[in-house]
Image (cartoon, grey):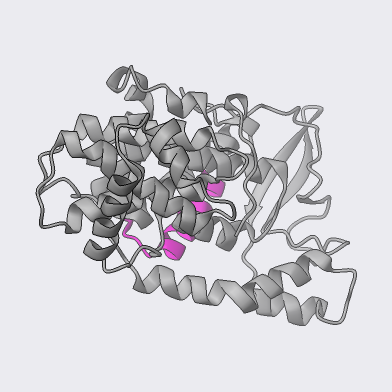
């Protein structure tokens, strides 16, 4: 799994809630391949195994360096054959990518295609208000944010997914008064599934739940959730689908600028989980639009040349990888932009997204 990086607010994209710190245009990014040659010249592979999925061409224009972003697609098999990474110990990054693809990614990709769980109408048979669900999502950010040394973003997204899936599948009709216990038990299941050192049950009872529910109550609800879902709780989350997109576009590149794009996308997805209505879009569509929104803000902020051409390349690539309709993608973009612009006004009391991100 892609290693997560700590993400501060001043690193986000330049939308109202997302700001990526603007570097000087003449700065050369260490993990981006740069070339003074024209594109019709033979491509030279970078040294030290730096596989790049897009190229920056530097041109002098009005005494300034203008970066031109290009997206280039490589299959791992082609790279392995051309660079002989299995025989070259110096290509450590390419070897790592190949091993990741061989031992993990193919199985993960199969799971993405065959385990589709749509959670957009999770409250249709419940008496739980959309507003209280939004508060629960925000509270989960706070709870798990206080265990930052042992939990990850995966734990949060798994917690919300388990809660929504349970509410969708349950034949029992729950009301607002039950959501607190359901949320606690969902987080307890998620931390045991995702974290190496999971949050102790005693912490959920005492520190998180303030002894409102006993250990027996939390365990009973855990059992109800697992049996209702037939123990099917390992399905891909929306975060997994974002990681899939990032890997397909940028491979295992750990360049700070790309990591900022990834973290901005995660922030947007957390924002989306607060809003019940936008989750009617398929998870693939939400992940794709959030990812593209962050890329677009980054490209605009960096003032790249030929921005429209660059963004069109990314749209084509992202929709192809996600296997989504362009119309749905554009519709979701409109909804997403509206949510980002209106989030603080729509949810003025929900502060944990900014506090713990």
Q: Give above or below for 306 relative to 51.
A: above
Residue 66 is situated, as x and y percent measured from the top left of the image, at 73, 36
Percent of width and height locating residue 265: 50, 42
Residue 182 visible in this rendered orientation of the protein: yes
Above or below, 341 relative to 76 = above
Task: In this rendered view, identify the residue nearer to me: 338 or 185.
Answer: 185
- In this picture, residue 327 sits left or right of residue 151: left
User: What residue is rendered at 31% in x and 66% in y?
Assistant: 116
Q: How many marks?
A: 0
Q: Quadrant of residue 333?
A: top left
Q: In the rendered image, which quarter is residue 24 located in?
A: top right
Q: Quadrant of the N terminus?
A: bottom right
Prevalent SS, magenta region: helix
x, y percentage for residue 35? 82, 52
Q: Residue at x 28, y 59 (%)?
A: 223
Verify whether residue 19 appears in magenta: no
Q: Which residues are magenta?
A: 308-326
Give above or below for 55 relative to 229.
above
Residue 288 in sight: no
Residue 46 figure quarter: bottom right
Where is residue 124 shown, x and y percent of the image? Answer: 11, 47
Of residues 36 and 237, the one drawn nearer to the viewer in this rendering: 237
214 vs 224: above or below: above
Q: Residue at x 47, y 51 (%)?
A: 191
């Amino acid at each position: 799994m892609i290693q997560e990086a700590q993400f501060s607010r001043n690193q986000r994209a330049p939308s109202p809630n997302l700001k990526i710190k603007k570097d000087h245009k003449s700065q050369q990014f260490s993990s981006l391949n740069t070339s003074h040659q024209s594109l019709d010249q033979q491509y030279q592979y970078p040294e030290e195994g730096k596989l790049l999925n897009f190229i920056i061409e530097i041109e002098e224009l009005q005494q300034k360096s203008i970066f031109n972003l290009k997206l280039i697609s490589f299959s791992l098999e082609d790279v392995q054959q051309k660079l002989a990474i299995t025989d070259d110990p110096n290509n450590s990054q390419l070897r790592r990518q190949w091993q990741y693809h061989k031992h993990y990614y193919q199985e993960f990709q199969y799971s993405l295609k065959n385990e589709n769980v749509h959670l957009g109408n999770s409250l249709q048979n419940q008496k739980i208000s959309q507003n209280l669900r939004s508060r629960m999502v925000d509270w989960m950010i706070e709870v798990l944010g206080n265990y930052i040394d042992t939990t990850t973003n995966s734990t949060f997204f798994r917690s919300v997914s388990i809660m929504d899936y349970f509410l969708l599948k349950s034949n029992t009709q729950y009301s607002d008064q039950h959501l607190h216990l359901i949320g606690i038990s969902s987080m307890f299941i998620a931390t045991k599934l995702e974290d190496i050192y999971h949050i102790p049950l005693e912490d959920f009872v005492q520190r998180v739940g303030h002894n409102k529910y006993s250990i027996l109550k939390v365990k009973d609800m855990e059992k109800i959730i697992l049996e209702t879902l037939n123990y099917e709780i390992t399905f891909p989350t929306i975060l997994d689908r974002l990681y899939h997109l990032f890997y397909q576009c940028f491979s295992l590149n750990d360049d700070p600028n790309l990591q900022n794009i990834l973290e901005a996308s995660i922030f947007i997805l957390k924002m989306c989980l607060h809003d019940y209505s936008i989750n009617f879009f398929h998870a693939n569509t939400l992940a794709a639009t959030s990812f593209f929104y962050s890329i677009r803000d980054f490209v605009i902020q960096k003032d790249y040349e030929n921005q429209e051409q660059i963004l069109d390349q990314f749209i084509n690539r992202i929709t192809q990888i996600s296997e989504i309709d362009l119309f749905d993608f554009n519709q979701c973009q409109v909804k997403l932009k509206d949510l980002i612009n209106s989030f603080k006004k729509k949810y003025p009391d929900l502060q944990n997204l900014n506090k713990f991100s």
